[in-house]
Amino acid sequence: MLNTDFERPSPAVGASPPMPGCDQTALFLDLDGTLAPIEATPDAVVADRHRTALLRRLVERFDGRVAILSGRSIAEVDRILDGAVTNVAGVHGLERRTPAGPEIAMPPHPALGRVEETLACFAKGQRGLLVESKARSVALHYRGHPPAEEACIDIGRRMAAIHGLQVQEGRMVVELRTPGPDKGDSLRLFMAQAPFADATPVMVGDDMTDEHAFEAAADLGGWSVLVGDPRPTAALYRLPDPAAVLAWLEEAAS
């Protein structure tokens, strides 16, 4: 369960992050809401050649110490980022890819198909709800109908309890996932391997799902950046939106 009683100073304070040193930093970046704006549907987020070029420069500038930690599958991350980053943890850590070997993925929970059917029936009863299958998880999006938040969270929690799944609540979404590694675990695994080992981890993300990675970065001597409006967080700095994140990264890549 995610710890929301953060003991470290919270910037929800609004301090801008310092510029990371390229010779000693490992960059960990969320995708939706961080590198790309949140769109009405997941498919509406598409590749952008300027962002792709920036990420490729960052990978070179930081000697490969750049990783994407996303709730999306690795295939979706590659679609949106044009494969610019090799090191990717997808589905909040249930999938992971490094240059050292083949992609590692947790086997999907056997109940996910039944849960997806239940959520699809539920979504049909209310306009604006969207069910997204990710093979190792299933997400119920309510950004198209925010008043359904309480009902979506309720059915998500009930389905998770019945079937032994983990609940991942995020921005306008509740996700039921196969039990396994989260973004914090993924950050730690990357940091235990070359080229990340012995660097200072810096995590940038916008959602409650990124808090695991914020805490892991701090535990390993690093720091994090919250993207978006101020809120209680384990991050030490804040940027207002993805445009500000890309501007900050442009400076880091120069």
Image (spheres, rainbow, N blue to C red):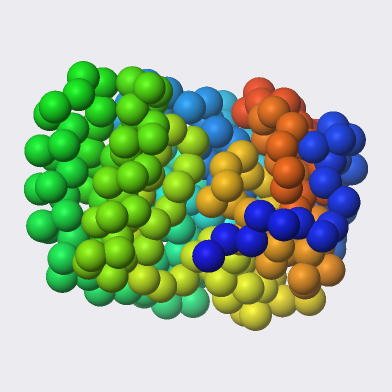
Q: Can I make out residue 65 in this image?
A: no
Residue 118 sits above or below residue 124 on the image: below
Q: Can I make out residue 84 in this image?
A: yes
The residue nearer to you, when weighing 200 against 140, is 140
* Image location of residue 159, percent across then percent down: 24, 56
* Image location of residue 251, percent across then percent down: 80, 34
The residue nearer to you, when weighing 235 against 199, is 235
* Image location of residue 166, percent across then percent down: 37, 63
Image quarter of residue 105: bottom left
Q: Residue at x 49, y 76 (%)?
A: 100
Q: Residue at x 33, y 27 (%)?
A: 148
Residue 50 sits above or below residue 233 on the image: above
Residue 21 sits above or below residue 39 on the image: below
* Image location of residue 49, percent across then percent down: 50, 28
Q: Residue at x 16, y 65 (%)?
A: 111
All told, the count of numbered labels is: 0
Q: Is residue 75 left or right of residue 47?
A: left
Q: Is residue 5 left or right of residue 183?
A: right
Which quadrant holds the C terminus? top right
Image quarter of residue 4: bottom right
Image quarter of residue 164: bottom left
- Residue located farthest toward the bottom when viewing the structure as drawn: 192
The residue nearer to you, when weighing 205 against 153, is 153
